[in-house]
Image: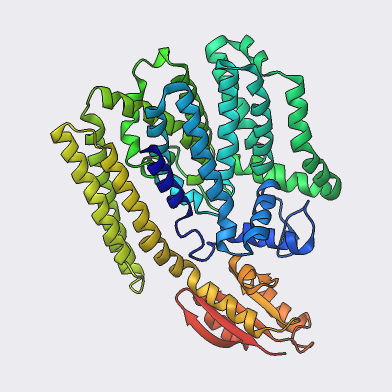
Amino acid sequence: MNKIVFAIIIFISLLRLGSGRLFDVDEAVFAQATKEMIQSGDWITPTYNGEPRYDKPILFYWLMAFSFKLFGVNEFAARFTSALSGLILCAVLYFFIKNLKGEKQAFYTILSFAFSLYYFIYTHAAVTDMALSLFISISLICFYMSEEKNKKFIYGFYIFSAFAFLTKGLIGIVFPFGIASVYLCIKKGFKGLKELYNLWAILLFLLISMPWYVAQILINGKEFIEQFFIKHHFMRYTGVISGHRGPIYFFIPVLIIGMFPWISFIGKAFKNFKRDALKQFSLVWAGFIFLFFSFSTTKLPNYILPAIPAFSILISYGMIEVNKNFSRIPYIFSAVISILIAGFLIVVKVKITNLLPYFNMSWLNVLLLIISFFAVISIYTFLRRERGFLLFAGLSFILILAISIKVLPAINEYMQGTLYKYSIYAKQNLQKNDVLITYKINKPSIPFYSDRRILRIDSEKELIESIKNKGITERKLNGVVISRVKDVEFLKSIGLNLIEEDRDYAIFTFSG
């Protein structure tokens, strides 16, 4: 059975990995920055559109660059690092839990982890989150093993914390050391904190993580410190970045949907809580990250991904308990959540149909059908007093297939199809010295697919000056402008030639 499940997990992780264009903004900007790194040969300072990009540290760019070298510069290669990280994390979780709790609980852990929307979405996204989750998880597993099995595992704790620090910055330190410290204080009081101290392990951490940071400070100085540490760390936590504000309860529905239907079993995990160290550690791990970001001003669903392995461990405890002593409560919860999700999808369908009548909504009917089956299965297991784990796994697999085959292609085509078409037009029709302008849009997929730098302009005055007063027309340069449809009349009024309007975007040309 376990071999079959692992084969299915590999299938899920690689399912249509290269289909669909890179999504704006995050996927496309990582891919474009990595492409520029390979082209420029500068392996220290990532750039986007020729300008330094200080949002994230270097390791994920290096991993994606290796993937580009291996598979070519394409969507599959851009997402491969995340897929591979997810697969490795599944294997690590399985053997970790098997070693401590046995094969059945290890099976339940990876079942709830890999057969979830969280896993599928972030193994198919060219962003740092799954790689970060891998490094933080291995770091924390090494810490726990150093407490329970062998002190030498503390070296693994520091090594993988260093990798996490090189993947997403200070979070790579705050989470492993914060979680380990809280756990030690709970178990042994403040005196337990000294167990984290190991001079050689600290030196190893510094040896791995610090050379890149030192190089960046030496090369880019104050600009790097202000952009990387202040803007993208402290301001992201204390302020709102890119409009991603959320209420304090933001992650509750996100977790329920992202771990559906397995989250239904988590309530049963807390029996005999005080007598199980792994259960306590998993709660500290999950709770620390969940609460940390709940109080952050900026909130996005991916923020709590490093907590999902811990939630999966807790869920596996609940499944073990239900397997021993049947309880109807998880199935009632699952049925209620299924009905609520179905109701939400109906509302979404009505809203989108009214706002975007040209948007193909057939995929939503498929989702509604599958979610309805979850409700039926939940009620069936409730009435028949059957466990239903494999039925849930089967439906989860079907849900993932439906999302991959029906939902994501429709959303991807709507969000990225027009931009991809216009990018290819620019690539095929512009000469080396011609100009590609994006007007009031931030879409990194355009430079990625057009394979050229863009001139990004965000105001009417700046556009007029760029075209007329900065010598573009005087130098007889041709150009393409990509904008939103709402700006068409203004762009026509200044003499640009409208080629096409398609959905939300329009493309213009001008001649020098």
Judged from this view, the residue extending furthest toward the right is 218
Q: Residue at x 59, y 26 (%)?
A: 142
* Placement of 424 over or under 181, stated as above or below: below
The front one of 223 and 413 is 413
The colouring scheme, among rainbow, by chain, secondary structure or one colour, is rainbow
Q: Position of residue 165 (x, y in %)?
A: 67, 38
Q: Is residue 265 above or below residue 457?
A: above
Residue 322: x and y in percent read 27, 26
Tell me the quarter of the picture where residue 177 sits.
top right
Q: Quadrant of residue 428?
A: bottom right
Q: Quadrant of the N terminus?
A: top left
Residue 394 as seen in the image, left or right of residue 170: left
- The image shows residue 195 at horizontal and vertical percentages of 65, 15
Measuring 79% from the left and 87% from the top, which residue is drawn there?
A: 475
Q: Is there any visible trace of residue 62 in the rendered image?
A: yes
Identify the residue at image location x=50%, y=77%: 485
Work out whether residue 73 or residue 293 is closer to the camera in this orientation and state it.
73
Question: Which residue occupies the foreground of this view, 487 or 399?
Answer: 399
Left/right of residue 316 with respect to residue 285 in the rendered view: left
Is residue 26 visible from the viewing direction of this image? no
For residue 356, above or below residue 376: below
Q: Position of residue 497 (x, y in %)?
A: 59, 89
Tell me the quarter of the image containing the C terminus: bottom right
Closer-to-camera residue (251/84): 84
Q: In the displayed structure, does residue 34 sit left or right of residue 323? A: right
